[in-house]
Amino acid sequence: MSITKQAGSAGGRTGDKVFSGAALGAGVLIMVVLFAVAVFLLVQALPAFTAAPADVTGGRGFTSYIVPIVVGTLIAAAIALVIATPIGVAVALFISHYAPRRLAQGLGYVVDLLAAIPSVVYGAWGASFLASQLKEPYQWLADNLGWIPIFAGPASSTAKTMLTAGIVLAVMVLPIIASLCREIFLQAPALHQEAALALGATRWEMVRMAVLPFARGGIISAVMLGLGRALGETMAVALVLSSGPLMASLIRSGNQTVAAEIALNFPEAFGLRLHELIAAGLVLFIITLVVNMVARWIINRHKEFSGAN
Amino acid sequence: MSKRIDVSDLNVFYGDFLAVEGVNITLDAKSVTAFIGPSGCGKSTFLRTLNRMHEVVPGGRVEGSVLLDGDNLYADGVDPVLVRSQIGMVFQRANPFPTMSIRDNVLAGVKLNNRRISRSDADALVEASLRGANLWKEVKDRLDKPGSGLSGGQQQRLCIARTIAVKPDVILMDEPCSALDPISTLAIEDLINELKDQYTVVIVTHNMQQAARVSDKTAFFNIAGTGKPGKLIEFSETTTIFNNPVEKATEDYVSGRFG
Ligand SMILES: Nc1ncnc2c1ncn2[C@@H]1O[C@H](COP(=O)(O)OP(=O)(O)OP(=O)(O)O)[C@@H](O)[C@H]1O
Ligand SMILES: [Mg+2]
């Protein structure tokens, strides 16, 4: 009796050891890979930072080269999130709390499917279909709202502009946000939803009292994941945007993003140009890191009231 | 204000499954009624039909009528949201909103439907409700702390405060003490005794002593077997149910000779 017991616990101990060893190994491996990537980027980027300003593309140093395309990247991502966040959250809420169960299942499936479409397909769709549909609206915007800097004319005749790229990015990140938010909304505790209903809350009030506050951190995470995709998206932007110098108007051709800049120029690059592009990659890497840290900070700030305790 | 409830020929379904059958019962105003019975006999299910919470469950529906001072809760055009603001509910597991402070928890129901309330009125209502739930002394210095930071018994009293803050006519309680220690249980039982001066109280409990201590009348529910619907077996004064019940099943159950 005691012998079998010991054997059993010894077996459990071996299992524990194997598992904790494997977990530790995996953790260390991730750190090593991340570290190696960072070191590679830094070493390869260094020449671009130290090069004479006149040698850098644009002829006025690395900062003047990188700032416009970083701003372009942020603009594209911002447009995408401004459009996709409210729609994504609304779609998720509809699926989780409003739609009849059959419809919700079908819709959930469609959303997951949309998230799996490769970005080059979205890019092709944006360039060949969406852009042609947007020519007239852009013309209208330029004619009627042209006094707002972001809608200043003349509107691009191909409509391959920043706004179009932003809309394509929005369509791409929408399913990510919607699908993650749906999962989170479905996990909102029934206990508190019933409490709200029993107090005489309407369905929308219940959502506001017992679903959205609970899902707050999750929504932010979902948006950050969407933002990550929008910042790093290469193909869709490269196909949709006819790039140019930084400008405020979103309906004229112009602007560029870091990821598209790298993708379009990398094949022919050598020497200093290659270092420049890698340095641009490093900058993108840092932006994503900062964005994620800010998101964590926002989520943690409200821990006390998060319901986790 | 306190109102009475008349239930007639009520059948309660989950989809096609008849969970509770043919209930006729009258719950008097300003009294405490206890529901007792073995697990699965439909006490919770029946209780939840009294404020139309049953239909929140997918497939949940009822036949028959529930009258609140003569008005049928299930008549066409009656808004369940309104019904629930008149008939409050306290759940088995204390469920204060974790994202809200103690104060906001108390005001949660009051602020619904876009109702506005001035700061001083809100303060007065928070204090009155917390006093009404015997919780004021314990939390008055930390009204802005999250409600989830209280002990289980305090959380349950917070839920009661939240329920009485909307001034309902009836308060339904589904095993409100089953997760609490004896001291907290006593605190809540005392509270129930005070609540009946103003409210119609209905309480589901597995604890016979508790039913005997707090209730004026007791309803015994039973079930013939798994898959069969639960039924109301006997309903009368609590002393009658516990001392000389009419039905054999009731006597067996209250004397512990069940099954
Ligand atoms: N959501 C549901 N869907 C389908 N059937 C349900 C659901 N909830 C309860 N039931 C069934 O209804 C019957 C009554 O359940 P109910 O929870 O009302 O019993 P109860 O008397 O409250 O039991 P307990 O004392 O254990 O709380 C049971 O047969 C149960 O399986
Ligand atoms: Mg129950």
Image (cartoon, coloured by chain):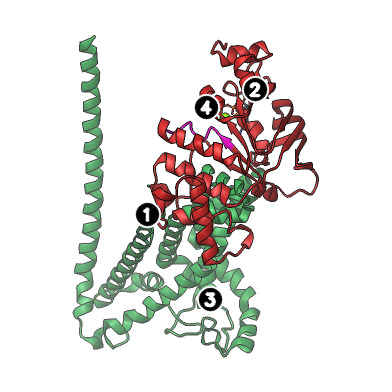
- Specify whether B5 is left or right of A93: right
The magenta stretch is B173-180
Question: Image quadrant of residue B19?
Answer: top right
The residue indicated by pointer 2 is: B221
The residue indicated by pointer 3 is: A163
Q: Position of residue B68 (x, y in %)?
A: 74, 41
Q: Mark 4 belongs to which subunit?
A: B
The circle on residue B210 is 4
The three-letter code of the residue at mark 1 reads Glu
The residue indicated by pointer 1 is: A304
Q: Position of residue B153 (x, y in %)?
A: 43, 39
- Please say whether residue B176 is one of the residues in the magenta stretch: yes
Alpha carbons under labels 2 and 1: distance apart:
43 Å
Q: Mark 3 belongs to which subunit?
A: A
The chain displayed green equals A
| Crowd around label 4: few <14 · some 14–19 · many ≥20 (10 Å) | some
- Specify whether A109 is left or right of A292: right
- Please say whether residue A106 is one of the residues in the magenta stretch: no
The chain displayed red equals B
| Crowd around label 1: few <14 · some 14–19 · many ≥20 (10 Å) | some
Decide which of B58, B79 is in the foreground and name it.
B79
Q: Secondary structure at mark 3?
A: helix
Q: Residue at x 57, y 47 (%)?
A: B163
